[in-house]
Amino acid sequence: MSNNTLTITDNRTGKQYELPIENETIKALDLRQIKVSNDDFGLMTYDPAFMNTASCKSRITFIDGDKGILEYRGFPIDQLAEKSSYLEVSYLLLHGELPTESQLKDWTWNITHHTFINESIKQVMDGFHYNAHPMGMFISMLGALSTFYPDAKDIFNEEARWKQIYRLIAKAPTIAAFAYRHRIGMQYAYPDNDLSYEGNFLNMMFKTTELKYKPDPVIERALNVLFILHADHEQNCGTNAMRSIASAQTDPFSSMAGAAAALYGPLHGGANEMVLRMLSEIGSVNKVPDYIKRVKAGEFRLMGFGHRVYKNYDPRARIIKQVADEVFEVTGKDPMLDVALELERIALEDEYFVKRKLYPNVDFYSGIIYKALCFPVDMFPVLFAIPRTAGWLAQWAEMLGDADQKIARPRQVYLGQRTREYVPMAERNGKTEGAIA
């Protein structure tokens, strides 16, 4: 008997089954052979929210939550944040290696020269109500863009596939900035191809009457770091949505609209907004101890602490904390920072939080920085979606080349009634078994 197997004894029948172990996993379909009778469907696993189910094999992002490790293609996140640009990291995610100087130059040129959007698409943007949420507009515009590029449906044509990658990475900041300008009633500021990826985004967001927008280098660098930290994060909710939709061979614009819709939720892309609301509610440092008591009493959660994956200090949070200091030297210190620092100090010392491994995550400081950079709170999910574009596309491209992948179609455990006789309207009593979940 091989050591690299799992032996299962079914106590219902007394039968034993030997299942191969590969990469610390067993194939779920190997459980299908475990049956009580020949007409039995076979054993399945029940795993709501994929808490312990691997849906794919990937070479893009590695996370060790217990040790607080995050790597893109094997490179530690702190090294990339310190030494790389976002476009360099996006090249890494999609190509598997860091670019040479000439490769980065070509990559940057291709991204930069796809930043403009078709003038007709602006009419779609103009159709939104003045107070429409920027993320809702962002999602809708991605879906609308799919109709402008019919070649995007040719997903197995490598040349066409790369063209969509250039387009999406390039146009995501443009769509985001246009959504913001529409939201506040300002005319659109067009891309400036002389600026960096982040500098151009700041230009489209905040340019007013100046002939040439010049971004502050500290703010530009801070945005670059934040974009790198958010570029990919393994099989999270948004990425799972991207892969699931794309498994139907959907075009990348539509697939990414679905991924962005997942990011729209407050438990995903809106988490840093919840942190800001919490800090505003606390108000001052002297109110922190009382707030902590209420958290420990179970009245509410401490936002920005703890993570589904990380059971240690989120490595991205450490980097962002350093960036925050640099940003506040330019923008001035936000009083919320003192509240945040006191919260972090208590949480890292208090046995209640230490025992539960509730360490600060990436959302804890990112919202404070975005606020200092004058981004409105409802732009926070969009600021998450812009850099995540590269990660989503890397996951999409990887999935297309994976022979094991088929259209996503999870199973269910059916608990409802079976085969009932139809009841005519006049004979129905109106009683129900309970509310529909």
Image (spheres, helix red, strand yellow):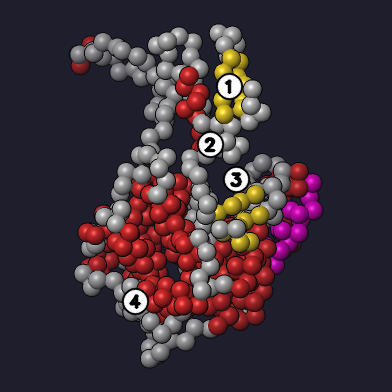
Q: Nearer the viewer, mark 4 or mark 3?
A: 4
Report the number of numbered marks: 4
Task: Report whether residue 345 is seen.
Answer: yes
User: What is the number of the mark on residue 113?
Assistant: 4
Foreground of the two, 61 or 297 = 61
Packing grade of label 2 (10 A; few <14, some 14-19, many >=20) is some
Pointer 1 local density, CA inside 10 Å: few below 14, some 14–19, many at least 20: some
Looking at marks 4 and 2 on the same chain, the residue that comes earlier in the sequence is marked by 2
Spatial CA distance of label 4 from label 2 is 40 Å
Q: Which numbered tag is attached to residue 308? A: 3
- The amino acid beneath tag 1 is Glu
In the rendering, which numbered label is found on residue 155?
A: none
The numbered mark, 1 or 3, whose residue comes first in the sequence reads 1
Residue shown at the point (45%, 9%) measured from the top left: 37
- Magenta residue check for 338: yes
Q: Is residue 288 above or below residue 376?
A: above
- First in sequence: mark 1 or mark 4? 1
- Label 1–label 4 contact, CB within 8 A: no
> Where on the picture, by quarter, is residue 108?
bottom left
Asked if residue 348 lies in the magenta stretch, the reply is: yes
Disc marking residue 18: 1
Return the disc, 4 or 3, that comes first in the chain's sequence: 4
In the rendered image, residue 350, in percent from the top left (x then y), is placed at 78, 50
The residue pinned by badge 2 equals 53
Residue type highlighted by circle 2 = Thr
Query: What is the distance, in whole Å, between disc 4 and disc 3 at their CAs?
Result: 38 Å
| Figure check: 396 above or below 83 | above
Marks 2 and 1, Cα distance to the nearest angstrom?
A: 20 Å
> Considering only order in the chain, which callout, 1 or 2, is on the residue closer to the N terminus?
1
Residue mark closest to the camera, 1 vs 4: 1
Which residues are drawn in magenta? Answer: 337-351
